[in-house]
Image: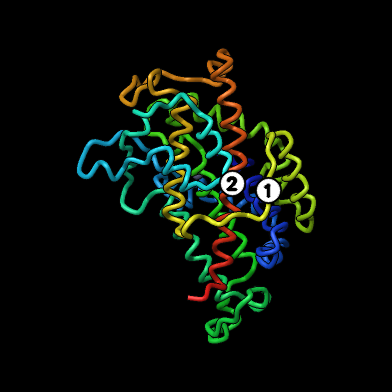
Amino acid sequence: MKQATHAWIAVRAMGLIEEDAETAGLFAILRPHTRNAALGAWMPDLADSKLGSGDLDNHVFKMQPFAGDVEERFITDKKALLKALGPARAVAKFIADDATLDAGWWATPYKAEPQPCQDIPTRANAIATTLTDQLILGERPVTNRIPRKFALSSMISPDERTRAEQLALFFFMQSHFVADACMPCHCDKRAISSYAGKLHPQWEGFIEKIVGPEFDGDRVERCHDRPRELLDAARAVDSRAGITFALPIPEPKGGDLWKDAVAVCRASFAVANIVAPPVQFPYDGDKSRALSVKDLKADAAAWGRFEKATAAIMHDAVLNVAMYWKRIWKRLDRKD
Ligand SMILES: [Zn+2]
């Protein structure tokens, strides 16, 4: 995803946690720092970040057919995937309605083979754990909002506590990886989905046009004390994207963010295969063969699928960020 899209996703997710009574406390902490979304949500793509969590492999979870040991472990049939995603995700509905991927496709094992601990689900989960610690160790205005009291924060000096603006930056940083999980080309190993091809950059450009110029980094960062303006601008994108959100924000099934993010990536891989069918673009296909947005537009059925997929991706990128934030926030109040 491009910079403005990442900023929009983070700010729009803020709008959802504002409207959900269970996350209103988190919204109150982050609200004054909404403009940090322009930097935080984009930071993992900046050069200096590549030495840390922004390492290139952390932005992808590229799957392909797998033939190896315990290959049945890597089969997720359609029913199982839809169950893992739950009913609230638009991508689940898009996949449920699809008839282009046949039973053979769904019965095939697919696997991503990232560098150890360098992939989207690991990164999204790692920052979530860090955020839980940061909240527990927050400065007084932060811990005052948390529904439960933690003794740990009173054992450290005020200077050592996490400031609300640092928290906002890290929440927005986490949103980057959750958003990347929703971009089909980030989860598809085929040459057709590489950034050097046409589909990947053109699809991201298509989404950025829907988002519009209000979320360009400079503009967002200039909104010092105008979070309401940003939140309203983010909501205004919904109608252009053809999406609506339902409340309350659901929680990831089973509460395991890593597992949930793997399911989101697996769904993104399926979406990539619906938009660029493997019969036309095989897994061992020609590296020079490209698929452009213009090619998709030339075929009414392909264009219909592409437009629906785009709306589902934009909806779910926002929803998934809000779901993960809600999960982090509610974890602070767990009883075990
Ligand atoms: Zn990225």
In the depicted view, which residue is nearer to us: 92 or 328?
Answer: 92
Q: Amino acid at mark 2?
A: Ala
In the depicted view, which residue is nearer to us: 90 or 158?
Answer: 90
Q: Residues within 10 Å of mark 1 (few under 14, many from 20)?
A: few
Q: Secondary structure at mark 2?
A: loop
Residue on which disc 1 sits: 246
Instruction: Pinpoint residue 194: horizontal percent, then vertical percent.
Output: 42, 30
Quadrant housing residue 2: top right
Q: Are marks 2 and 1 in contact (CB under 8 Å)?
A: yes
Residue on which disc 2 sits: 88
Q: Amino acid at mark 1?
A: Ala
Q: Residues within 10 Å of mark 2 (few under 14, many from 20)?
A: some
Left/right placement of residue 27 relative to residue 336 reads right
Instruction: Pinpoint residue 165: horizontal percent, then vertical percent.
Output: 64, 65
* Residue at position x 35%, y 54% in the image: 117
* Residue at position x 55%, y 27% in the image: 202
Measured in 3D between alpha carbons, the distance from the residue under mark 2 to the one under mark 1, in whole angstroms, is 8 Å
Left/right placement of residue 87 relative to residue 50 reads right
In this rendering, is residue 19 above or below 209?
below
In the depicted view, which residue is nearer to us: 141 or 77?
Answer: 77
Instruction: Pinpoint residue 331: horizontal percent, then vertical percent.
Output: 53, 68
Dot 2 or dot 1: first in sequence order is 2
In this rendering, is residue 63 above or below 121?
above
Q: How many marks?
A: 2
Which quadrant, please, contains the N terminus?
top right
* Residue at position x 53%, y 15% in the image: 295
* Residue at position x 78%, y 48% in the image: 232
